Image (cartoon, rainbow, N blue to C red):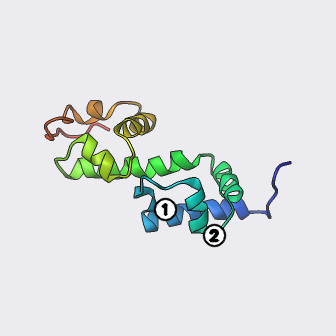
Amino acid sequence: MKQTFPDGYAKDLYRRMRQVLSSDMAWKSSTLSLGLFARMLGVPVKHVHAAFHEGGTTFYDLINEYRVNEAVRLLSNSDITFFEASYRAGFGSYGSFVDSFRKKYGKLPQDAYGCRRKNGRHNTPHA
């Protein structure tokens, strides 16, 4: 049986979830889980699921959206490598960063920024 909530509850919770993620930078933790996030919000996991459904996304897609944005910010403002940017942004693996970047931009990081993975030098981003 589908869980029902008061009108606007899931939408309000989704908005609150985004606020918590951006203000606390909780998305930077590579150990952040759905259960831990629900505890941070003080609500049951099923409420968080409903809010993500309302927002049209998933927990990991939203977290990785924040992480990709941070990695792009780091890559645009420094000479660090893709691997270092993905690590600093909270990705648990470089592969997850590449997959999330490709999902958002439709291309690989090295195609957007030029080859810089090994030597740390960069070109102007084309993302």
**Of labels 1 and 2, the one closer to you:** 2
Above-or-below relation of 56 to 111: below
The residue under the point 18% across, 51% down is 78
Q: How many marks?
A: 2
The residue under the point 39% across, 47% down is 91
Q: Secondary structure at mark 2?
A: loop
The residue under the point 58% across, 54% down is 34
Disc 2 designates what residue? 42
Disc 1 + disc 2, Cβ < 8 Å: no
The first of marks 1 and 2 along the sequence is 1
Position of residue 12 measured from the top left corner of the image (x, y, whole percent): 66, 64
Amino acid type at image mark 2:
Gly
Position of residue 125 measured from the top left corner of the image (x, y, whole percent): 25, 40
Position of residue 123 measured from the top left corner of the image (x, y, whole percent): 17, 38
Position of residue 92 measured from the top left corner of the image (x, y, whole percent): 39, 46
User: How many other residues sit within 10 Å of disc 1, few (<14), some (14-19) or many (≥20)?
Assistant: some
Disc 1 designates what residue? 21
Above-or-below relation of 126 to 51: above
Above-or-below relation of 99 to 84: above
